[in-house]
Image (cartoon, coloured by chain):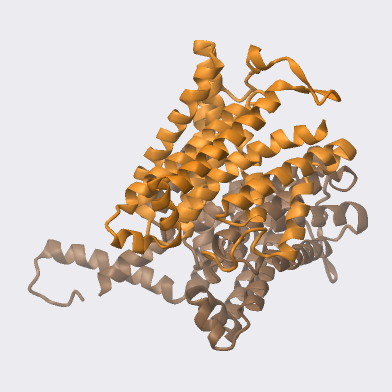
Chain colours: A brown, B orange
């Protein structure tokens, strides 16, 4: 692109800058999985403090799970707090009452997320578009009220307290994960696993059907795919990743508050996903980073920080509907053509 | 007695669900800020009563204010999104509601606002010689019935109502006949917002007024609209009443279930009739 010699020096400088930028983005676009993982490995060393990094990566994982629903299948769910919260409670309750084993606790979180998505998905999946959004929201509120009333199990308004963070037990090895950085890498382990699993799923025939459903459900149906089941399956996958993220969040805080089930949590994951960019690997993490960083900075400055986040979100919907990463991608590909 | 209490609550649902439903039916926009508009209606009512001391004046001004605000929102924020994916207006109003809640928190604080029913309606009245019922709740019921009747008359008997109904069926065709649909959409969004405003001020003496009051209400109205059938006014009225009664009866017999019962009703209705009581299958999906 820049190998014509007759352009002036400044122009060349400008263009080479631009093309370097484009090349970087193009490179990341070509190997999204690799770059997401590398980025997340160096990430805790570039944020102001480690606890924020852990929170960001957990929300990123949640948004990644949500993305299966919104970004890859095109279902706008407003009830993902249910799967996140149920996963968090399941992990916490298992660790407190049944067995102090982190792996088992998280497995239970994931499974409970999947089961909840299985049941609620059955009720919601037949409807599409706006109906789907309203139904998922309504059922998530149902779960919230159940959690609120079932004080014996969940602690009700007080939340679930004193979740033990026991050392990891590997065969012949016990690792303490109580420091923020170690816990970050412990979470990262699950994030990488989820990314790999998601990558595998998206490149499988099933993954292509998912995206076909997003693009044109009628055509996918005409091609002989049972689209309702495909959407249901995507919903369950999304629910299990959200449940896993919920479990990790419970371990991170040693506590599960009732607000994990509240619809604000659902709203937050929608905002994060949209802010970062739907249907991308790195988008959810960028979105979580920007969202939580802004929350951190703004809430230190003013008690009414939600007004700014709300405004940013509204502007984002109006002018950058494809999110931060999506907009960067569009800008560079426009330059290329 | 409890049946009447349920009816007065159901009437609030009816009014909010009607607003949501006409906006949705014509614009295919789900207004997530509807709960926040209801909340603004309540705060507007509280403020106007605090300044003028006249509830009736507040009852007239509030819907005008909230309706006007609805007009501004439609023109400024929602109109640019027509023709894009159906989910974007939903996301936009979702963000808008946070802004609206925070604005109230800044100016009025987070605590409950005291608000009492007007003197004229504070005495209980005897019903059928059997029990006493707060006259304000009766007023809410009557008021909603009047508004429903006016709305029905407007939609069925006036030429503008005819245009609106035609627009719900096929807006392209109406536009081809030389009618500016943008204006109609604009107007309908204003009417829907005004309904939310009235519901807000009517609700404020019987439910507490605080910044998040619209959130729970919004979700409950979604349930009402889904059960009634999306875009169906008849369905919205019927299911609003059903839900109000369901909550009142459960509160009487087993209070912890009161928050949950409407969702159970919804689950049952959806399993039996997936498109709601009066919904048409496959509408706008």
| Residue A260 in the image, given as x and y percentages of width and height | 70, 47
Q: Residue furthest bottom?
A: A224
Residue at the spot x=83%, y=40% of the render? B249
| Residue A330 in the image, given as x and y percentages of width and height | 34, 66
Q: Is residue A49 shown above or below B105?
A: below
* The one of B247 and B277 positioned closer to us in this rendering: B277
* The one of B54 and B89 positioned closer to us in this rendering: B54
Residue at the spot x=82%, y=41% of the render? A156
Q: Is residue B36 left or right of residue B111?
A: left
Q: Is residue B184 shown above or below B202?
A: below
Q: Is residue B283 left or right of residue B132?
A: left
Q: For residue A10, what is the image quadrant?
A: bottom left
Number of marks: 0
Q: For residue A207, what is the image quadrant?
A: bottom right
* The one of A155 and A75 positioned closer to us in this rendering: A75
Q: Is residue B148 left or right of residue A158?
A: left
Q: Is residue B255 visible?
A: yes
Residue at the spot x=58%, y=31% of the render? B200
Q: Can you say which quadrant of the picture contains the C terminus of chain A?
A: bottom left
């Amino acid at each position: 692109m820049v190998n014509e010699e007759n352009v002036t020096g400044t122009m060349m400088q400008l263009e080479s800058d631009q093309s370097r930028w484009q090349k970087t983005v193009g490179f990341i676009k070509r190997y999204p999985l690799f770059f997401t993982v590398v980025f997340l490995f160096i990430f805790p060393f570039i944020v102001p403090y480690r606890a924020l990094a852990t929170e960001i990566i957990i929300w990123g994982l949640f948004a990644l799970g949500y993305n299966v629903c919104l970004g890859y299948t095109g279902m706008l769910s407003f009830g993902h707090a249910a799967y996140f919260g149920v996963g968090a409670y399941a992990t916490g309750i298992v660790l407190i009452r049944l067995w102090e084993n982190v792996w088992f606790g998280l497995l239970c979180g994931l499974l409970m997320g999947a089961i909840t998505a299985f049941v609620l998905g059955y009720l919601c999946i037949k409807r599409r578009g706006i109906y789907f959004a309203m139904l998922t929201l309504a059922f998530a509120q149902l779960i919230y009220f159940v959690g609120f009333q079932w004080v014996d199990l969940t602690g009700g308004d007080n939340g679930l307290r004193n979740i033990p963070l026991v050392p990891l037990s590997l065969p012949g090895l016990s690792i303490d994960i109580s420091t923020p950085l170690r816990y970050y890498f412990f979470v990262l382990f699950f994030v990488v696993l989820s990314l790999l699993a998601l990558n595998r799923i998206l490149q499988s025939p099933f993954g292509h059907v998912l995206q076909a459903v997003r693009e044109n459900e009628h055509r996918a149906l005409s091609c002989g795919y049972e689209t309702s089941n495909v959407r249901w399956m995507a919903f369950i996958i999304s629910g299990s990743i959200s449940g896993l993220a919920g479990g990790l969040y419970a371990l991170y805080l040693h506590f599960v508050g009732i607000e994990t089930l509240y619809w604000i949590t659902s709203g937050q994951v929608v905002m994060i996903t949209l802010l970062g960019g739907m249907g991308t690997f790195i988008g959810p993490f960028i979105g979580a980073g920007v969202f939580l960083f802004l929350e951190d900075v703004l809430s230190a400055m003013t008690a009414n920080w939600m007004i700014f986040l709300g405004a940013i979100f509204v502007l984002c919907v109006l002018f950058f509907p494809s999110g931060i990463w999506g907009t960067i991608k569009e800008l560079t590909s426009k330059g290329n053509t | 007695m409890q049946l009447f209490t349920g009816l007065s609550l159901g009437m609030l649902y009816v009014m909010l669900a009607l607003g949501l439903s006409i906006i949705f039916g014509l614009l295919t926009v789900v207004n997530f800020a509807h709960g926040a508009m209801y909340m603004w209606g309540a705060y507007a009512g509280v403020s106007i009563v605090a300044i003028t001391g006249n509830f009736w004046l507040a009852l007239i001004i509030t819907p005008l204010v909230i309706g006007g605000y609805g007009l501004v929102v439609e023109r400024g924020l929602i109109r640019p999104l027509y023709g894009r994916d159906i989910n974007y207006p939903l996301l936009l109003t979702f963000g808008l509601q946070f802004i609206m809640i925070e604005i109230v928190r800044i100016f009025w604080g987070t605590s409950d606002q005291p608000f009492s029913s007007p003197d004229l309606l504070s005495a209980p009245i005897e019903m059928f010689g059997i029990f006493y019922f707060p006259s304000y709740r009766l007023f809410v019921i009557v008021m909603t019935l009047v508004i429903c009747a006016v709305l029905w008359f407007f939609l069925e008997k006036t030429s503008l109502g005819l245009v609106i109904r035609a627009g719900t069926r096929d807006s392209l065709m109406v536009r081809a006949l030389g009618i500016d649909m943008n204006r109609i959409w604009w107007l309908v969004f204003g009417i829907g917002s005004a309904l939310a405003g009235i519901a807000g001020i009517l609700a404020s003496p019987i439910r507490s007024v605080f910044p998040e009051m619209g959130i729970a209400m919004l979700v409950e109205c979604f349930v009402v609209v889904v059960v009634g059938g999306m875009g169906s006014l008849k369905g919205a009225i019927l299911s609003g009443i059903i839900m109000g009664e369901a909550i009142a009866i459960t509160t009487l017999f087993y209070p912890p279930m009161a928050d949950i019962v409407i969702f159970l009703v919804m689950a049952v209705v959806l399993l039996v009739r997936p498109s709601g009581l009066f919904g048409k299958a496959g509408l706008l999906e």
